[in-house]
Image (cartoon, rainbow, N blue to C red):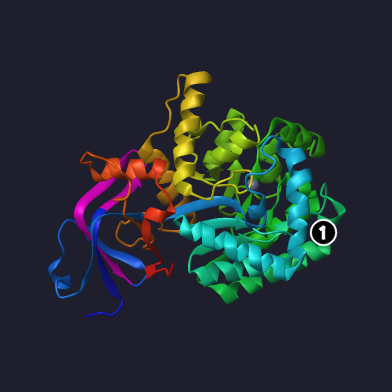
Amino acid sequence: MKESVKILKGHILFTKSLDTFTIIENGYIVVDGPHVAYVGESLPIEYTDYPIKDYGNKLIIPGFVDTHVHGPQYCNRGLGMDMELLPWLETYTFPEEDKFKEEGYAKKVYTAFIDDLKRNGTTRAVIYGTIHLTGTVELMKAVADAGISAYVGKVNMNQNAPDYLREEDSQSIADTIESIKKSTDFAPYVRPIVTPRFAPSCTYKLMKELSEIAKAHDLPVQSHLSENRGEIDWVKSLFPGSKDYTSVYVDHNLIGQQPTIMAHCIHLSDDEIEILAKTHTMVAHCPYSNNNLSSGIAPIRKLLDAGVPVALGSDISGGHLTSMARVLTEAIGLSKMKWAEVDGERKPITLSEAFYMATRGGGSFFGNVGSFEEGFEFDALVIDDASIFDMNVRSPLERLERWLYIGDDRQIVDRYCRGALLCS
Ligand SMILES: [Zn+2]
């Protein structure tokens, strides 16, 4: 018997594609090391002598992927929710981010933040730190200590930021390279990602240099795109040489060169959507943040129809909840409002589509992640929903839907990342 093998049994639900769930009642998952070796209704003969972790009537689903979240804004969740983006940044976000120059502060907040992600079933995340190198290393450490997996980016800002958060060009580049080196101390849990905050906070020169770092180290890129109308007008005035907001990033090789995630993407022209589709740029849709900062409703159906890969993000603290179960149900709700109030031609997104975006869709940024197909890395949550009162017998899919809407972390009894059971 191989020590690297574990076998789980239960009601298994996952999405191989946007349009449907794969459901295996009383099924088996064989995990070998970090990978799924088998999933199905009966156990293959070569595994019959192995012990089975029998989860009985519980649900087994993939772990969630949060593709857009700001660790240093964790203490601000639920604050300033009556402001729009730019005043919200000035009033709440930047003063809080300044505190992460202190290692002790960073360590405390990041430990609590990552613990919250893990508790709520996020096993993969794509995270912004701050401009500070030592604080960002604390974030990497918190990720590795928790046993989850994340891209962690040191943020770059050398213009249009308060003095206390504005970097000198040379420091910004040197600290970015050092943060990439440091991330190897926390492999395989942490991977680095190049993180220009958004176009207004970076000069042409800095954006070019960051794209060269991304290329030289073969790293992905994350930033923000087209969140708010005031921001879009501002970008137009700051970068008159570029055709539109998306083109600012294309012109600096921050879209189209390396794998890239752009958060929000709410007010895009058809040309801009075509660029995102052609370059396979992933959109991190953040429905709570769209709501809270009065940004608008991202055209998710239109993006999907155009072939743009879409994933979901909590966007702490533009969004106020870390739970990706809540984020995915909110994405469904917002898409219904878009359909009812704005664009009756484009249907709301379905439960399977939202679930796919929160698991396999976002997981694709990490490789084969977010599904139980053979060869995928095994990230999973085990849900015991027996405490949710109901007089009726429900199917596993009904039980999953209900838990996504009204359940919480108390029903998540086990969490796995990369094949390992995480301690709670
Ligand atoms: Zn953001």
Q: Is residue 258 visible?
A: yes
- Image-quadrant location for residue 174: bottom right
Query: Looking at the picture, how far across and down is residue 164, in whole percent?
Result: 84, 57
Of residues 10 and 286, the one drawn nearer to the viewer in this rendering:
10
- Image-quadrant location for residue 372: bottom left
Q: Quadrant of the N terminus?
A: bottom left
Q: Within 10 Å of the Cα at label 1, are there few (<14), some (14-19), or many (20+) other Cα atoms?
A: some
Segment tinted magenta in the rendering: 12-32
Q: Residue at x 78, y 44 (%)?
A: 91
Q: Is residue 177 visible?
A: no
- On screen, residue 424 above or below 404: below
- On screen, residue 240 above or below 206: above
Magenta segment includes 18? yes
Query: Looking at the picture, how far across and down is residue 213, in whole percent?
Result: 68, 62
Q: Secondary structure under badge 1?
A: loop
Query: Looking at the picture, how far across and down is residue 109, in whole percent?
Result: 64, 62
Q: Dot 1 corresponds to which residue? A: 167
Magenta segment includes 25? yes
Which secondary structure class fits the magenta region best?
A: strand
Name the side, left or right, on which 268 lies relative to 390.
right
Query: Looking at the picture, how far across and down is residue 25, in whole percent?
Result: 20, 51
Q: Residue at x 59, y 66 (%)?
A: 111
Of residues 97 and 43, the one drawn nearer to the viewer in this rendering:
97
Amino acid at circle 1: Glu
Q: Residue at x 65, y 66 (%)?
A: 108
Work out which residue is located at the far right of the displayed protein and give it: 163
Of residues 163 and 279, the one drawn nearer to the viewer in this rendering:
163
Q: Quadrant of the C terminus?
A: bottom left
Name the side, left or right, on which 398 lies relative to 80.
left
Name the side, left or right, on which 195 lies relative to 59.
right
Name the side, left or right, on which 310 lies relative to 98.
left
